[in-house]
Amino acid sequence: MAREQAVKARKERNAALVEAMLLAAMADGSVSQREMQTLLARVLERPEFEGTQSGELNLLVETSAVRLAEARNLEEVLSSLRRRLPDHKNRMLAFGLAAAVALADQRATRSELGLLKTFQAALGISEDEVAQIIDVIEQGGSLSEALGEPLERLFAEVMVLVLAADGQLKEAEARAMVESFAADPLFQNVSPERAQGFVSESVAALATDGLPQRLHVLAHGLATHSQRVKAYQLATKIAHASGRTSTAEQRILDLLQATFGLADDEVARLDQQG
C-alpha cells in the first residue's frame, strides 16, 4: 500500500510539473517548436523523471494538455498544482521549468511574463528565488544550480537511508544520528527543528522517489570527494551503532560506495573508524 501511494504521488508530481511547462508554452496562444524542445530537454535532465520511457512521456504530455483544456479557469489549475506540489522545493522546480519554457525563445511575451508572475504568487516563490532561477536559465545552466539541496540535508539523507535499510528503527542508530546532529561541526548551524525537518524530508523523498533516484540525487549533490567521504563516514556510524551491521544496512553501504566511487581500501579505513 505504501509503495502504491508513493508511486501515485510521484506520478501526480510529475504531471503537475509537465502542466506548469505546458501552461507557459501555451500562454501566448501558440506553442513554438523551440518551447516544446525545451520542455522535453528539461524533463530529461531532471532526476524526478528518471526511468520514464519516451512513450510514457508522450502520454504524460498529452494527458496534461487534455487536463488543462478541461479546466474551468486558471485558478482551478493553480489550486491543483498546489495540491500535487505540497513542498516548496517542488513548487520552485515547477516555476523554474515554466520559466525555462517561457524564455526558450530568448524573450518572453507579455502573456508569458504575466503567467510567471501569477505562478510566483500562487506557489509562494520569493523575489530572490525568482531572480536566482532566472539567472541560471539565462546563463544556460541546469536548474539543479538554483534548486540544489543544502549539503546538511543531503548528509542527513545518507544517514536516513541506513536507518531505513531494514525497515525498523533501532534505538542505538537513532541515538547515533541525534549525536551526529548535536556534535558534528558539519551541523553546527542546523537547529534541532531544522534537523528534524531534514529527516522528515529525507523519509518522504525516499518513499516518493525510491532508492535509485535518491542515490542519483546524492551523487549530483555531493560532488566532491571530501563530501562523499564524509557522507559515507556518517553512514557507517549509523550502521555500526547497534554493534552489528545488518545485511540490509551493508547493502546500502555497498550502494553508497559504488555511487560515490570510493575505493575499497578507503572504505575499509572508514569502516574501521565507524
Image (cartoon, rainbow, N blue to C red):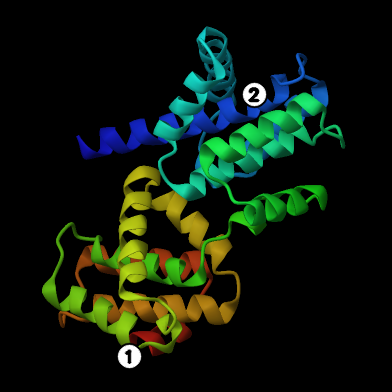
The answer to whether any part of residue 89 appears in the image is yes
Is there CB contact under 8 Å for labels 2 and 1?
no
Regarding mark 1 in the picture, which secondary structure is present there? helix
Q: Is residue 13 left or right of residue 176?
A: right
For the N terminus, the quadrant is top left
Q: Position of residue 64 (x, y in %)?
A: 54, 18
Q: Amino acid at mark 1?
A: Gln
Q: Tell me which residue sits at (41%, 81%) in the image.
A: 187
User: Of the residues under marks 2 and 1, which one precedes in the sequence?
Assistant: 2
Q: Position of residue 220 (x, y in %)?
A: 57, 61
Q: Tell me which residue sits at (47%, 85%) in the image.
A: 266
Mark 1 surroundings: few (<14), some (14-19) or many (≥20) residues within 10 A: few
Above-or-below relation of 179 to 170: below
Above-or-below relation of 99 to 251: above
For residue 234, which quarter of the picture? bottom left
Mark 2 surroundings: few (<14), some (14-19) or many (≥20) residues within 10 A: many
Above-or-below relation of 259 to 3: below
The answer to whether any part of residue 44 appears in the image is no
Q: Is residue 215 left or right of residue 248?
A: right
Foreground disc of the pair 2, 1 = 2
Q: Is residue 94 left or right of residue 249?
A: right
Q: In the drawing, what numbered circle is on residue 22? A: 2
Q: Position of residue 245 (x, y in %)?
A: 21, 75
Q: Tell me which residue sits at (51%, 71%) in the image.
A: 151
Judging by the rendered image, the residue that carries numbered circle 1 is 272
For residue 221, which quarter of the picture? bottom right
Q: Position of residue 139 (x, y in %)?
A: 82, 53
Q: Nearer the viewer, residue 184 or 266?
A: 184
Q: Nearer the viewer, residue 132 or 163?
A: 132
Regarding mark 2 in the picture, which secondary structure is present there? helix
Q: Amino acid at mark 2?
A: Leu
